[in-house]
Amino acid sequence: MSAAAQTTTTVSAQSFDIRPFDAPLGAEIIGLDLSRPLSDADFARVHRAHLDHALLVFRDQRITPEQQIAFSRRFGPLQIHVLKQFLLADHPEIFIISNIVENGQPIGLGDAGKFWHSDLSYKEFPSLGSMLLAQELPEEGGDTLFASQQLAYETLPSELRRAIEGKRAAHSYTARYADEVFAGIRRPTLTEAQLAEVKAVAHPVVRTHPETGRKGLFVNENFTTHILDIPGDESRQILAELYAHSAKPEFIYRHPWQPHDMVFWDNRALIHLATGCPSHLRRRMHRTTIQGDVPF
C-alpha cells in the first residue's frame, strides 16, 4: 500500500510550516508535533514535501520510541537491522547509533555512516527512507552530509552516462565491514545467521524513483563492490569517477543537528555521510528504517 493510501482515524489538523533550505535539497518542518496523531491531510502534506525535498527536518520532536515507530510505519513496513545487539530493548524497530560505551561495551553502532552510502542498499528491498532522532548530541561536530544522487545523475558527463547505461552493480553489507574507521572500535563479528541476512544483491547503477519517476545514481562507496559484466579494472575506474562526481559540493546539504531534531531522508534519492565528532563527546541517535521497493 502506498503512503498516500494509508489512513488513520479522523484527528484534528495541525498548523505547521514547511521551509525549504537554501541548499540543493531539504526543508524543515516547524510547528508539527509528532507526539500527536497526524491527520490524513497533514500526512499527505508531509509525504508530498518529502518527495519534493528528499529530506525533512522535524524540529523539536520530544517523542517516545513508540511514537517514532508509529509515524515511520505510516510510510511502509519497517526493517530490522542485522546487528541485533544494537536494537533498542523492547523496540527492535529502532537501531541505536552511538559512540557511547557502557561497561566496556558499545551501546550502538559507533562508526555508522563513515563512508557515503544509501541505507540498506545491500538488501533486495533497500530502504525507502530513514528517520534519525537526536537523543544526545555532542557539543561540537556530529554534522551529517546529504548528497542528491538525482542531481548527480542529471549532471553526469555524457561519456560517463553512456558507460553506465543499463548496467547493474553488486552491493554487499560486508564490503567494508572490517575496515578500521574509528581507532579502537571494532565492529562485532557476524554470525552465520547474520551473514545469511545480508547476502550480496545486484541493483541498477541508475534507478528510477518509484514515486516521482526521477532518475538518480544508485551506487555508493560503502556497499557497492563492482559493476557487473565488465572487467574489474574498468568497473573500479567507473565507480571511482561516479563516487567523485556524486559528492560534489553543489549536490550537498550539511545538517548541523539541534536538540530533538528528527531527520527523514529519502534513500532512493540521496546518499549521506557522518562527519564524526570527538570520541570523548557522547552522541546517541535512534533510527527507524522504512522498507522500499526493488530498484528499477
Image (cartoon, helix red, strand yellow):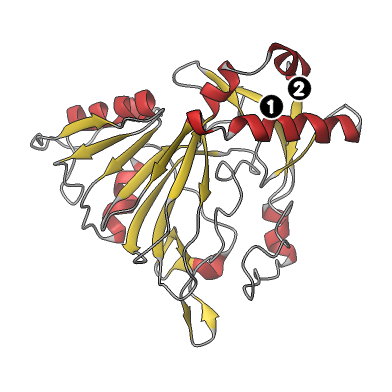
The kind of secondary structure element at disc 1 is loop
**Can you say which quadrant of the picture contains the C terminus?**
top right
- Vertical placement of residue 11 versus 168, above or below: below
| 144 vs 268, nearest the viewer | 144
Q: Does the rendering let one see residue 201? A: yes
Q: Quadrant of residue 23?
A: top left
Separation (CA) of disc 1 from disc 2: 6 Å
Which residue ends up furthest to the bottom in the rendered image?
103
Residue 10 in the image, given as x and y percentages of width and height: 13, 35
Q: Position of residue 199 (x, y in %)?
A: 73, 49
Which three-letter amino acid code belongs to the residue tagged 2?
A: Lys
Compared to 195, does 294 lie above or below?
A: above
Contact check, label 1 and label 2, Cβ < 8 Å: yes
> Does residue 168 appear to the left or right of 97 in the view shown?
right
Q: Residue at x 50, y 17 (%)?
A: 214
Q: Which residue is mark 2?
A: 167
The numbered dot on residue 19 is: none
Q: Which residue is mark 1?
A: 205
Left or right: 222 with respect to 212? right
Q: Residues within 10 Å of mark 2 (few under 14, many from 20)?
A: some
Left or right: 137 as drawn, with respect to 145: left
- Viewer-nearest residue: 111 or 157: 157
**Residue 64 x/y as whole percent:** 26, 60
Q: Residue at x 58, y 63 (%)?
A: 83
Crowdedness near tag 1: few (<14), some (14–19) or many (≥20) residues, C-alpha within 10 Å: many
Which residue shows up at 15% across the image and 48% down it? Answer: 36
Query: Residue at (16%, 42%) from the top-left corner?
Result: 32
